Image (tube, rainbow, N blue to C red):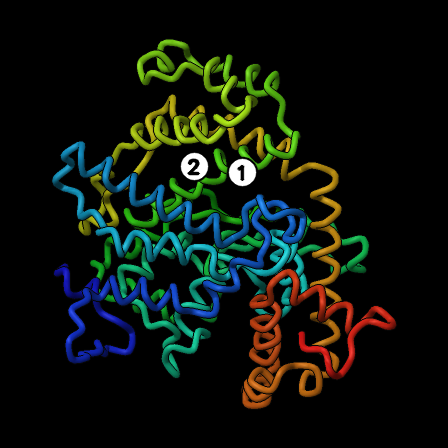
Amino acid sequence: MDDEMWKARRSDRELKRLGDHRTPFERDRARLLHSKAFRRLQAKTQVLGIGDGDFYRTRLTHSVEVAQIAVGLVQQIHAKGVSRVPLPDRDLMETIAIAHDFGHPPFGHGGEVALNYAMRSDGGFEGNGQSLRLLTKLESHTPSFGLDLTRRALLGILKYPRPLTEASKLTQPTAVDPLVLSASDWKPPKCFLDTEKDVVDWLLQHVPAHDRKLFVEWQSEPSSEKHGKTRHKSLDCSIMELADDIAYGVHDLEDGIALGLVSREMLQALVSRMPSSWMNSVGLDFDRVLTQLFGAGERKMAIGEIVHVLMVSVDCESLNAFEAPILDCRAKLYPEARQLLDLLQEVVAERVINLQSVQTLEYRGRYMIIRLFEALSSSPTQLLPESFAQKYLIAPSKVERRRVICDYVAGMTDSYATRMYQRLFVPGEGSVFEKL
């Protein structure tokens, strides 16, 4: 599989502008940074709600941090001399990391659950799948191919290579009043959307048939109680996902400490479960790190040290199962480093994400998104903005018309969705002269 194949675009067109000496991956990165979807990330929830303060992370700052960590992981793998690995260059790795959350809707996972519920009879919704849809069809760089990124960049963004209809659990819950909707019932599977099957077919077009079949293999098949989950992803995607885990486990922990949600005693108890021999071998003095985390002025030093220890613990394994090296190689952490990261993520889940105040805001966001979707569906040509109303009118089926509404809501920022909800449902809010 030659390198030029991975640089190909779905439009089969590479711009040849006079004096432009950029590589295809440099062009990919530039298209992302100048896109509307990138700018909208600054007003979308990461964990803590937008507007709760100017210190806490948004989807935008999180994505930039993931990109920085991902590039560092590539450098670490390269420094270890793993010559068999076709490592991504800096521009490609940043492109994949920056774009990985493009499709996430307003209000975080609450918005994702809400849209999956709203689209339950029309193809469902999942944030990773929406990222692929947005990059390949919705962004307006080209008329028909979205940002028209290279094949390798898009493959790096594809985290789960099965469509929603195949990955969904076999028994769908019964639709209920949104006020009493259980988020766990309507959490979507990890997948791509069926509307992008043509894109995924193109991504794997030149991959050997054996590799294509193996690439979509289940780690766990769907059952009546649980969604299915795929086993494999590309090398680039595995690096991005590892960087995402580190950013989530360490940086969201930093936000939790700053809010007073995570105590020194809690971290001390968790880290006591780590083997001291490994801590010593990587030079991690956690007593000192704890003092810095909860002291004055040195928290960033401590956060940087934890990230460093995790990054230098990266390895690259070969599965010896695929013909294509980009599918056969996988980034992973050494077992002890993975254990430390899992413990940090456990703290974030328990003390930040599952916090009552965070969950009440997620509930509110979920309810608002469902109500917005219902209102827009009741009178789409009057309530949708002109560009989406035109798409709605020319959509050839009911399912595709509802997908237009879903695309509009998924693209909203938290603040835009809130203003739209207030205009529609809160008496006295909004006027014809006030822009959303």
Residue furthest toward the right?
Answer: 427
The residue at which mark 2 appears reads as 246
Residue at horizontal 61%, vertical 16%? 265
Residue furthest toward the front?
Answer: 297
Residue at horizontal 70%, vertical 36%? 355
Q: Nearer the viewer, mark 2 or mark 1?
A: 1
Measured as percent of width and height from the top left, residue 252 is found at 54, 38
Q: Secondary structure at mark 2?
A: helix
Measured as percent of width and height from the top left, residue 84 is found at 13, 41
The residue at which mark 1 appears reads as 252
Q: Are marks 2 and 1 in contact (CB under 8 Å)?
A: no
Residue at horizontal 43%, vertical 43%? 244
Instruction: For label 1, count other residues whose C-alpha is less than 10 Å away and answer few (under 14), some (14-19) or many (20+).
Output: many
Q: The residue under label 1 is which amino acid type?
A: Asp
Taking depth in this image into account, of 24 and 43 the one nearest to the observer is 43
Asked whether the viewer can see residue 142, the reply is yes
From the viewer's perspective, is residue 245 above or below residue 203? above
Image quarter of the C terminus: bottom right
Q: Secondary structure at mark 1?
A: helix
Measured as percent of width and height from the top left, residue 419 is found at 72, 68
Judge left or right: residue 240 versus residue 269. left
Residue at horizontal 87%, vertical 71%? 427
Q: Which mark is residue 318?
A: none
Instruction: For label 2, count other residues whose C-alpha is less than 10 Å away and answer few (under 14), some (14-19) or many (20+).
Output: many
Q: The residue under label 2 is which amino acid type?
A: Ile
Image quarter of the N terminus: bottom left
Asked whether the viewer can see residue 197, the reply is no
